[in-house]
């Protein structure tokens, strides 16, 4: 097997810039994550996955492709991984969480689109995304406008499939979504030449459910008065979940859950009794983005729940395992994914009610809504969430920000003032 340096150079990346981004991410990770005291020992696997993932994981993907596997790039948790795995392909989440690649997107794209999209595209444009040269097919979904129009561009350059996600939640929409998921299955079969059989689908449904159950189990511990894992570490686990090899990830996560169980029994926590409990809701914080969680927790609070695509939306609800035929399994998969509450739906009462329910379940003292600049759907929905929380007697705040460090001081001041108010 090739060493990691020659693997990377075979991808024709802009190596100096790639190295700069790696070292920038490494420094941020040290500052925001590794510096925490009293972390669970089992987090070392996830640390390694963050700091070394782009080298080790790429080597694995190159090798798998040499044996005929296809890599499918994704940008959203509506893409059903079960189908990708059932065709022996590898799904990789390509969303960018670094500020360093944003300027490369701004040279070609309008500046007023969200940093998540700019970071993702910037990595592709600057040849620093090591997964891009390995991608056999990309999958986009019709969620927000910025994404939809991005697919117009990406689909001209490489093989690309667009999943049409309806924007309402009634029966006709659910039916359209089932058809879309079938069409996606056909596209994946076409790409890989592998039939998505009931046997393979059944296996991948069980494996994805195992992953979700373990993530759910881990998050249950965050409901305790003394959470045995920090919000920052729980976020790192979620970020790794999106790209790591699924069986290895589940085994490592199981070891972490066991450790967390014993920490809970011994009341080991990184937070003193009476720490203010925060629920974060809104846009996802993808790999490389630990900004908000770090500010909250270094301001003396604990993030106890994430209602986001790097949180509950990813692992809530299992795919029904009772279906027997491949067609029924596809319906069961489609139905599970259709219940994800992204703000692109209208109306979206389910998310609003769910944020209040989660705040109560996780005993959050306060809710912070995380809105990335120019993310109109989460920004507008924030108004109804603020109202619903107010009615439930739960204080909240909306934070609009991007990936840069520029507003860190200002955000810290606002968050500290909020925490003070909650304490008194
Ligand atoms: S926020 Fe919506 S569009 Fe973004 S990843 Fe989540 S489900 Fe997809
Ligand atoms: S954060 Fe908002 S604007 Fe950005 S990709 Fe997700 S839904 Fe779209």
Image (spheres, helix red, strand yellow):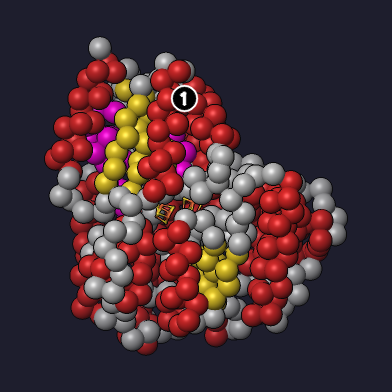
Asked whether mark 1 and ligand 1 are closer than 8 Å, the reply comes as: no
Q: Nearer the viewer, residue 205 or 30?
A: 205
- Picture coordinates of residue 385, whole percent (x, y): 44, 31
Indicate left or right for 63 with 117 as reference: right
Q: Where is residue 409, by image quadrant?
A: top left
Can residue 182 be seen? yes
Percent x, y of residue 416: 20, 28
Which residue corresponds to mark 1? 388
Expressed as whole percent of the image width and height from the top left, the position of residue 214 reads: 57, 43
How many numbered discs, if any?
1
Q: Where the C terminus falls, by quadrant?
A: top left
Q: Secondary structure at mark 1?
A: helix
Relative to 69, is 9 on the left or the right? left
Percent of width and height locating residue 337? 63, 51
Q: Is residue 211 above or below residue 118?
A: above
Toward the viewer: 145 or 195? 145
Asked if residue 217 is positioned above or below residue 337 in the image, the reply reads above
Does the image show residue 233?
no
User: Is 313 positioned to the left or the right of 330 in the image?
Assistant: left
Residue under the image location 64 percent in, 49 percent down? 338
Q: Residue at x 49, y 26 (%)?
A: 356
Q: Which residues are magenta?
A: 288-308
């Amino acid at each position: 097997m090739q060493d990691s340096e020659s693997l990377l150079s075979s991808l024709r990346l802009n190596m100096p810039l790639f190295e700069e981004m790696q070292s920038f991410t490494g420094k941020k990770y040290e500052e925001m994550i590794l510096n925490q005291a009293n972390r669970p020992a089992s987090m070392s696997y996830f640390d390694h996955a963050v700091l070394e993932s782009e080298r080790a994981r790429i080597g694995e993907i190159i090798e798998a492709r040499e044996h005929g596997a296809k890599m499918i790039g994704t940008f959203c948790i509506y893409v059903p991984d079960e189908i990708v795995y059932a065709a022996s392909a590898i799904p990789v989440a390509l969303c960018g969480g670094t500020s360093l690649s944003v300027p490369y997107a701004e040279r070609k794209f309008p500046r007023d689109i969200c940093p998540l999209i700019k970071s993702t595209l910037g990595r592709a444009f600057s040849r620093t995304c090591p997964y891009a040269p390995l991608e056999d097919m990309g999958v986009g979904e019709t969620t927000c406008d910025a994404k939809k129009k991005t697919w117009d561009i990406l689909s001209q350059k490489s093989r690309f499939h667009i999943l049409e996600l309806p924007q309402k939640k009634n029966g006709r929409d659910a039916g359209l979504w089932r058809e879309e998921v079938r069409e996606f299955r056909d596209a994946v079969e076409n790409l890989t030449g592998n039939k998505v059989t009931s046997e393979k689908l059944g296996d991948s449904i069980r494996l994805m459910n195992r992953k979700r159950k373990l993530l759910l189990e881990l998050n249950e511990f965050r409901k305790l008065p003394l959470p045995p894992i920090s919000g920052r570490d729980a976020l790192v686990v979620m970020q790794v979940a999106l790209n790591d090899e699924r069986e290895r990830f589940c085994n490592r996560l199981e070891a972490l859950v066991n450790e967390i169980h014993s920490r809970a029994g011994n009341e080991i926590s990184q937070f003193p009794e009476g720490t203010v409990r925060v629920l974060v809701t809104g846009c996802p914080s993808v790999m490389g983005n630990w900004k908000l969680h770090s500010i909250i927790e270094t301001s003396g609070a604990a993030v106890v729940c994430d209602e986001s695509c790097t949180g509950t939306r990813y692992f809530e609800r299992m795919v029904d395992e009772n279906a027997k035929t491949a067609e029924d399994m596809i319906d069961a998969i489609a139905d599970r994914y259709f219940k994800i509450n992204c703000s692109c739906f209208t109306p979206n009462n389910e998310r609003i009610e769910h944020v209040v329910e989660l705040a109560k379940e996780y005993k959050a003292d306060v809710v912070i809504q995380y809105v990335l600049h120019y993310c109109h759907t989460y920004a507008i929905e924030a108004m109804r969430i603020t109202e619903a929380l107010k009615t439930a007697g739960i204080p909240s705040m909306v934070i609009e920000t991007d990936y840069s460090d520029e507003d860190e001081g200002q955000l810290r001041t606002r968050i500290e003032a909020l925490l003070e108010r909650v304490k008194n």
